[in-house]
Amino acid sequence: MEFNLHLMRHLAVLVYLNEHPGQYEVVSRILGHRKVETTKTFYAGLELDAAVRRFLETIRAKREGTRLLATGRGGKLWLGRGTR
């Protein structure tokens, strides 16, 4: 496999998009593309796994926060009716 600057450019974009899924505008500016559509044509979808992972982490965190709010002392579910 030949390793050159162009391949390094693609790798840098992949690393960035894995950390920041969907941030094509930033990538487009860094790469010097005149239109963000050019960037999307070449890079859209490469970060799908990272986007799904970030989505699931967000949902899990929200669920955990909600669960913690719903529990009372002793870890029992608080129903809001004066009983625990």
Image: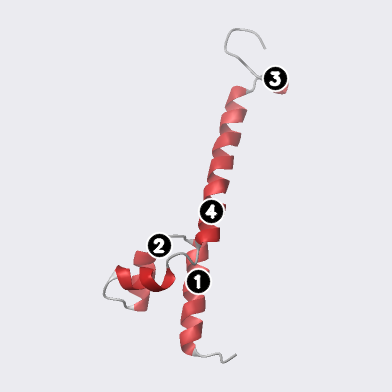
Q: Residues within 10 Å of mark 3 (few under 14, many from 20)?
A: few
Q: Are marks 1 and 2 in contact (CB under 8 Å)?
A: no
Q: From mark 1 to mark 2, how far is it between C-alphas?
A: 11 Å
Q: Are marks 3 and 4 in contact (CB under 8 Å)?
A: no
Q: Marks 3 and 4, how far apart in space?
A: 32 Å
Crowd rating for badge 4 (residues with CA inside 10 Å; few <14, some 14–19, many 20+): few
The mark that comes first in sequence, 1 or 3, is: 1
SS for tag 2? loop
Q: Is residue 42 left or right of residue 68?
A: left
Disc 3 marks which residue? 76
| Lower sequence index among marks 4 and 1 | 1
Who is closer to the viewer here, 5 or 44? Answer: 44
SS type, badge 1: helix
Q: Where residue 45 sits in the image (x, y, percent)?
A: 46, 64
Residue 82 relative to residue 39: left or right: right
Report the Cα–Cα distance between label 2 and label 4. 14 Å
Circle 1 packing at 10 Å, graded few (<14), some (14-19), many (20+), is: some
In this rendering, is residue 24 above or below 5? above
Please tell me whether mark 3 or mark 4 is closer to you in this view.
4
Q: Name the residue at 42% across, 66% down.
A: 44
Which label belongs to residue 14? 1
What residue sits right under mark 4 in the picture?
Answer: 52
Q: Position of residue 34 (x, y in %)?
A: 26, 75
* Amino acid type, mark 4: Val
Disc 1 to disc 3, C-alpha distance? 45 Å
The amino acid beneath tag 1 is Leu
On the image, numbered disc 2 is attached to which residue?
A: 23
Looking at the image, residue 84 lies above or below residue 7? above
> How far, Cα to Cα, is label 2 from label 3?
42 Å
The residue drawn where x is 51% and y is 56% is 51
Going by the picture, which residue comes out furthest to the left? 34
